[in-house]
Each structure stands twice: as C-alpha cells, then as structure tokens.
Amino acid sequence: PDRIYRDFDNHIYHVNGSKGKGPEKIREKYLEIVRLIQDKKPWRLIAFQLGVLSHYIADLNQPLHTATSKSENLFHSKYEKDAEVIEPKKPQSLKYISYPMSYIIEKAKISSKYYIDIERAYLRGNGFSDVSKITQKQINEATFDVASYFYSALERGTRGTSFRDLLNDFIDYIKAMFFR
C-alpha cells in the first residue's frame, strides 16, 4: 500500500487524538475481501487485497503508528529498521473477529501503551535492546491478528453473510464511531 496507494492516514490511528483512519480502512478492506470471496472473484485479486489488509493490521500493532511526539522523527525509522531482526512466532490458535473495526481499535490502544517506552529507549536509553521484548510481543500480536482476520474473512466469505453478521457489522460501526 505504501507505494501504490500512498495512503499514510490509513496506516495510523492515534488513540489519544483524531489522526488516522486505520480502523475504518481495516473494516472497509475486510468487508471488501468478504464480498470478493462471496462473489468468487479470482484468488489473485483476493490475495492482493489480503496483503493490503495485513499491512494495515500490522501497522496498528506497531506502537509508533498509534501515537506521536515532537521528536518521533529522530527514532521512528531507526526503530522499524531495528525491528526487522524479530521473527514472529506462529499463533497457536486463531480468533473469529466479529467486530473488525472495534477489535483493531482495542489492539491499537494496547499497542500505544508502549510508545513512550520506545521513545525513551531511543532518546535516553540503549535503543532497541531496551524494547526488543516489547517488539517481539507486538510482532506476535500482529501475526495473530493478521491470521485471525484472514481466517474470519475466509470463514464469512465461504459460508455467506448471515443476519447475525449484518447485526454485528452495525454494532461494530456504532461502537467504533461513538465509543472510541
């Protein structure tokens, strides 16, 4: 998505502010994928959209995409480069996600709690070595979330949309819009 769409706002969600449309885009992309599966569109197209969705999900599990500071430009890119050494752990199970936007908002809130730790590590500490465990945890969470969204889209797409799904979609929209 970075090179094709250039849609920076969809890669962030600042939980204590009004910046970023990541959760809305994740909901939109998830429902688009469900429709593509239901309409039996080519798997190449579905796989591409799953890749876009995975990028958005992973970004909202990255603490520096969930908050900001005046000095973030001093460490954001360095942290992301340093994090490339982390190998994700395979999820032991998956979760069916009934509320795609509300779910990722909650995950972004959890992720944002680590923002200050990363900032402190890079500006006044020992850099990545101070936050490698946090980074491993968040990469594992991102891996679990991506796999769970894929599972959920495939499950819903192949079985069809039920009345319960439509009700959940409505509840998800209301919760996400009014109870952030």
Image (spheres, rainbow, N blue to C red):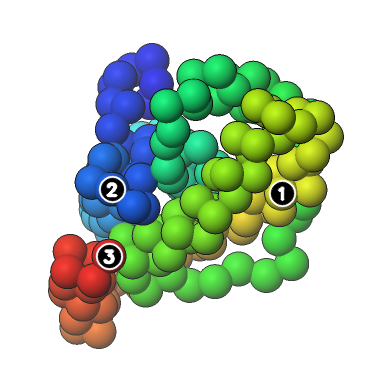
Mark 2 or 1: the one toward you: 2
Say which element carries label 2: loop
Q: Quadrant of residue 172?
A: bottom left
Residue at image position (51%, 37%) is 64
Q: Earlier in the sequence, mark 2 or mark 1?
A: 2
Above or below, comparing residue 77 to residue 170 in the picture: above
Q: Nearer the viewer, mark 2 or mark 3?
A: 2
> Percent x, y for residue 50?
43, 42
Amino acid bearing label 3: Arg
- Of callouts 2 and 3, the N-terminal one: 2
Residue under the image location 43 percent in, 70 percent down? 97
Q: Quadrant of the C terminus?
A: bottom left
How far apart in space, not on screen, are marks 2 and 3 (Cα)?
10 Å
Q: Residue 98: horizontal and vertical position, in percent? A: 37, 74
Location of mark 2 (residue): 17
Residue highlighted by disc 1 = 134
Q: Which residue is mark 3?
A: 180
> Element type at marker 3?
loop
Instruction: Give the CA distance from mark 1 to mark 3.
Output: 24 Å
Residue at left offset 70%, top offset 43% = 135
Depicted 137 relative to depicted 103: above or below:
above
Tell me where residue 178 appears, x and y as whole percent.
17, 69
> Which residue is more in the foreground, 79 or 31?
79
Q: What residue do we see at 33% from left, 66% from top?
A: 102
